């Protein structure tokens, strides 16, 4: 079984979804520490032909708290208006905007559940088949840290292959995984261009941008545009 484990991010970029789509089981890592200035509650959208920050307000955020101990703030209406302003003329606005409004208007206040719900709803829209679960629901040794904890989760879920984002090459060692009979691989996204209005292509934006400018068939093709690195 191919397994991926990632913190829940706010409308993450294409590489995150390629990882999720390639995994048979995707674990939302909700019981690890919240990272300030990361992508847990922020991303970037297209505005005036440039990348613009798009940030979800959070309450009680601290690097000493787990992600599932942080709450969602109250700026969802502002975020909806920002998307309406910047994407109203995008080709798939009418199909995508109701989904985004539903996600952003959620009454869920727990950050991990709020983000997890958004990941599941977008996965359903994109017709992904991966099983999505929360790490807080997985039996594991919570005393372990980093790589050892990931291996423990993989073993308990009987995973034969663990895939991670390309940045994980600095964190994980293939030989250590192999000793637990787990293959370690990394996804390196190619981030192919697609048409964004008439501006020069702005790379690496939120999945929101991808959905606004591409139909499901095109997105499915983009999801396969990556290199799989490892044994």
Image: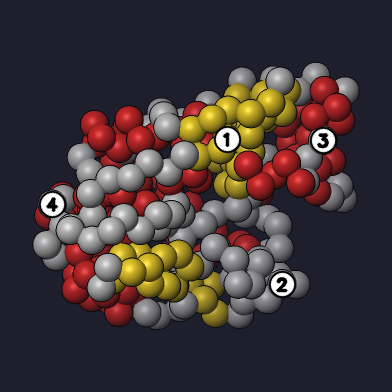
Q: Which residue is mark 3?
A: 173
Tell which circle, 1 or 4, labels the residue nearer the N-terminal end. Answer: 4
177 left or right of 27? right
Q: 96 or 106: which is nearer to us?
A: 96
Q: Rate crowding at label 1 as few (under 14), some (14 to 19) or many (20 or more) other CA atoms within 10 Å.
A: many
Asked which colour scheme the image uses, the reply is secondary structure
Tell which circle, 4 or 3, labels the residue nearer the N-terminal end. Answer: 4
Percent x, y of residue 221: 32, 30
* Contact flag, marks 4 and 3 (Cβ < 8 Å): no
Task: Name the residue: 37% across, 52% down.
Answer: 207
* Contact flag, marks 2 and 3 (Cβ < 8 Å): no
Q: Rate crowding at label 3 as few (under 14), some (14 to 19) or many (20 or more) other CA atoms within 10 Å.
A: few
Viewer can see residue 97? no
Q: Quadrant of residue 90?
A: bottom left
* Contact flag, marks 2 and 4 (Cβ < 8 Å): no
Tell which circle, 1 or 3, labels the residue nearer the N-terminal end. Answer: 3
Tell which circle, 2 or 4, labels the residue nearer the N-terminal end. Answer: 2
102 left or right of 149? left
Q: Identify the image quadrant of the N terminus.
A: top right
Q: Tell which tag, 2 or 1, sits nearer the viewer.
A: 1
Task: Name the residue: 23% across, 49% down.
Answer: 195
Q: Rate crowding at label 2 as few (under 14), some (14 to 19) or many (20 or more) other CA atoms within 10 Å.
A: few
Q: Identify the image quadrant of the C terminus.
A: top right
Relative to 106, residue 219 above or below? above
Tell which circle, 2 or 1, labels the residue nearer the N-terminal end. Answer: 2
Percent x, y of residue 20: 50, 37
Percent x, y of residue 159: 68, 24
Q: Regarding mark 3 in the picture, which secondary structure is present there?
A: loop
Q: CA distance from mark 1 to mark 3?
A: 15 Å
Q: CA distance from mark 4 to mark 3?
A: 43 Å
Relative to 94, residue 133 above or below? above
Q: Which mark is residue 63?
A: 2
């Amino acid at each position: 079984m191919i397994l991926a484990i990632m913190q829940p991010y706010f409308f993450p970029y294409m590489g995150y979804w390629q990882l999720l789509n390639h995994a048979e089981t995707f674990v939302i890592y909700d019981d690890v520490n919240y990272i300030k200035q990361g992508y847990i509650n922020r991303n970037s959208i297209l505005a005036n032909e440039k990348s613009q920050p798009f940030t979800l307000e959070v309450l009680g955020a601290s690097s000493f708290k787990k992600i599932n101990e942080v709450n969602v703030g109250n700026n969802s209406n502002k975020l909806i208006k920002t998307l309406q302003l910047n994407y109203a003329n995008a080709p798939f606005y009418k199909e995508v905007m109701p989904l985004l409004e539903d996600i952003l208007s959620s009454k869920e206040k727990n950050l991990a559940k709020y983000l997890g719900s958004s990941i599941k709803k977008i996965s359903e829209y994109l017709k992904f088949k991966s099983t999505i679960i929360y790490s807080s629901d997985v039996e594991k040794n919570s005393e372990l840290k980093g790589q050892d904890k990931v291996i423990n989760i993989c073993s308990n879920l009987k995973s034969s292959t663990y895939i991670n984002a390309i940045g994980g090459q600095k964190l994980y060692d293939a030989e250590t995984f192999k000793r637990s009979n787990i293959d370690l691989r990394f996804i390196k996204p190619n981030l192919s261009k697609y048409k964004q209005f008439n501006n020069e292509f702005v790379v690496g934006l939120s999945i929101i941008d991808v959905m606004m400018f591409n139909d499901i068939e095109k997105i499915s093709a983009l999801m396969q545009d990556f290199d799989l690195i490892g044994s």
